Image (tube, rainbow, N blue to C red):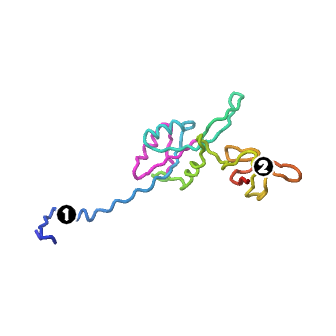
Amino acid sequence: MPPTAEGRHVSSAEKTTSKATALSPEPTAAPATRWYAAGIFPGKERVAERHLRIQGFEPFVPRCEKTVRHARRLETRSAAYFPGYMFIALDVALQRWRSINGTFGVRSLVMQGDRPLPVPSGLVERFIALTGRHGLLDFSGGLAAGASVRILSGPFAEMIGRLDRLDPAGRARVLVAIMNGEIPVDLDTKDLVAIA
């Protein structure tokens, strides 16, 4: 056995161990958690959410108010903004994502080849930011009926109007003063800004 720099003798087993340690790659950082879309059976969003949470996944279903006609009555209830789909946050390198496809209420993850396809960055985060305290999407951006608003784009750009009503789906009716009267104009709330 040849002596080392410290003057001690090294066995061949120690040499092999030190070579293997030197050749092993550095641990790589796992990719960040991303949001993925999953197909859900009709009306099974809550069942799928519950079972995914039990498994340790973080699901998110954007919801809005929906008016439905039933037995000659109109009812307003919470409904999925994207019927038949939900978003799930996961790290495909660390989590056992294949179990999602066997979860009650879930049809399957949206795939690209044999891997789940991530949704564009920032999309789900934007929906989460727009979710109000009741768990419903709120596209109004602080707008309130009766407020004065400026129209930002379209044929009525830069005109001032009075907000008549807001729709939970992100539409607004603005009364614009034209020719000695108020004309109702339907717009997206993203095209409006409140003025003092």
Looking at the rendered structure, the number of numbered marks drawn on it comes to: 2
Residue toward you, 155 or 117: 155
Up the image or down, 79 lies above or below 196; here it is above
Q: Residue at x 89, y 51 (%)?
A: 180
Residue toward you, 14 or 149: 149
Question: In the drawing, does residue 105 fall left or right of residue 164?
Answer: left
Q: Is residue 94 magenta?
A: yes
Select label 1 or label 2 by which is in front. 2
Q: Position of residue 89 (x, y in %)?
A: 48, 48
Q: Residue furthest front?
A: 196
Q: Secondary structure at mark 1?
A: helix
Q: Amino acid at mark 2?
A: Arg
Q: Amino acid at mark 1?
A: Thr
Q: Secondary structure at mark 2?
A: strand
What is the number of the mark on residue 162? 2
What is the number of the mark on residue 16? 1
Q: Position of residue 161 (x, y in %)?
A: 79, 52
Q: Residue at x 14, y 64 (%)?
A: 12
Residue 151 in which image quadrant: bottom right
What is the number of the mark on residue 79? none
Q: Residue furthest right?
A: 180
Q: Position of residue 70 (x, y in %)?
A: 68, 30
Q: Quadrant of the N terminus?
A: bottom left
Q: Is residue 101 magenta?
A: yes
Q: Residues within 10 Å of mark 2 (few under 14, many from 20)?
A: many
Compare marks 1 and 2 and give the one earlier in the sequence: 1
State how far apart marks 1 and 2 are (Cα): 80 Å
Q: Residues within 10 Å of mark 1 (few under 14, many from 20)?
A: few
Q: Position of residue 44 (x, y in %)?
A: 54, 36
Residue toward you, 49 or 195: 195
Question: Which portion, as a residue range, is magenta?
Answer: 83-111
